[in-house]
Image (cartoon, rainbow, N blue to C red):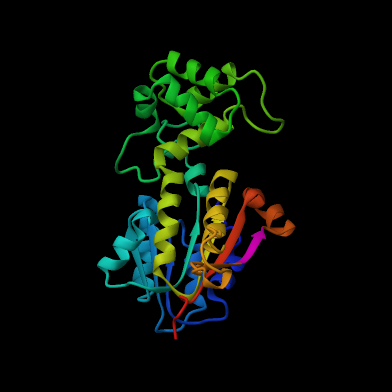
Amino acid sequence: MSHISVLLHETVEALLADRDTGIYIDGTFGRGGHTRLLLSKLDANARVYAFDKDPQALAVATELEQEDSRFKIIHASFADLKQEMNQLGIYEVDGIMADLGVSSPQLDQAERGFSFMKDGPLDMRMDNSQGQTAAQWLVDVSEEHLANIIYQYGEERYSRRIAKAVKNAGYIETTAQLAEIVKVAHPKWEKNKHAATRTFQAIRIEINKELEDVHTFLPQALDLLKSNARLAVISFHSLEDRIIKQFIQKESTLAEDTGWGMPQEREDTRRLKKVDRIRASEAEVKENPRSRSAWLRVAERLEPKGAE
């Protein structure tokens, strides 16, 4: 399956909010769908910076760099957003977007080891130039910690049973081997889902530190946004969406009254306002079933209180 950018037009339109110039960041370049549409709507003075860890994504981005002088790719995680932008002398931007999780090409290429649907080496690294593979990690991790990861990140109720079977299996070389071990250990799984769905998700999230990176990314993104600039983030499962929802909620809500002073004397610390929450349309889900679980959350940077 070729990569189809999820919530493509909705994300870019929400990010721009009728602007056609400025400095923008795509925190997750992937295959560049969102970035290309963004560039097509910006004037000659605009700049777009994109981040990605995946060497194959970087190869596509490097070609785009050569085609469009307004674009620059950065080989780093969006968790390093502020540091990387500050090194370029950029301290505020007009908008930041991110499309979280694993991309279709990563899932569809057996050699990347993300999917139980295609047999390949058990890798799962988004940046396969560094770090432990899933196979290596499964050797080193304790049964208890593995069970906790599968339970927390996969929301898998049979996590302890699965972890025991995985650790008893010894070195697991391929995705098909891991999928079969989980299937045999799993007493009951959801209709129309593979028994290993939740376990694979959990291990992938841990290997790539996906949730940790989202926690790290969001405050940095907020710090970089100019007044009235927007943040647009697409997530695909409840754990990611909960982090984004809670972050926006916290930054768009007045601090609780501590009981000291009159209400009008309370400091207004809000830095964001909620703009929208968007799901993929029925037409998009029909064309691209992977979009069915996607949520786009959009927020806008407020002007600091007391600013002229």
User: Quick check: 51 above or below 303?
Assistant: above
Q: How many marks?
A: 0
Report whether residue 160 is seen.
yes
Q: Which residues are magenta?
A: 275-279
Q: Please provide percent x and percent y for residue 229.
A: 49, 74
Extreme residue in the top direction: 168
Q: Main SS of the magenta segment?
A: strand
At a point 62% along the width and 30% down the height, the residue shown is: 194
Figure quadrant of the C terminus: bottom left
Q: Please provide percent x and percent y for residue 80.
A: 33, 56
Choose between 26 and 4: the one closer to the eye.
26
Residue 121 sits in which quadrant?
top left
Choose between 262 and 40: the one closer to the eye.
262
Extreme residue in the bottom direction: 308
Extreme residue in the right direction: 282
Q: Is 276 on the left-hand or right-hand side of 28?
A: right
Residue 117 sits in which quadrant?
top right
Report whether residue 116 is seen.
no
Choose between 87 and 30: the one closer to the eye.
87
Q: Please provide percent x and percent y for residue 154.
A: 55, 34
Q: Please provide percent x and percent y for residue 10.
A: 62, 67
At a point 35% along the width and 64% down the height, the residue shown is: 73
User: Quick check: 282 above or below 25?
Assistant: above
At a point 32% along the width and 66% down the height, the residue shown is: 85
State yes or no: residue 25 in magenta: no
Choose between 231 and 55: the one closer to the eye.
231
At a point 42% along the width and 67% down the height, the residue shown is: 25
User: Quick check: 144 above or below 22?
Assistant: above
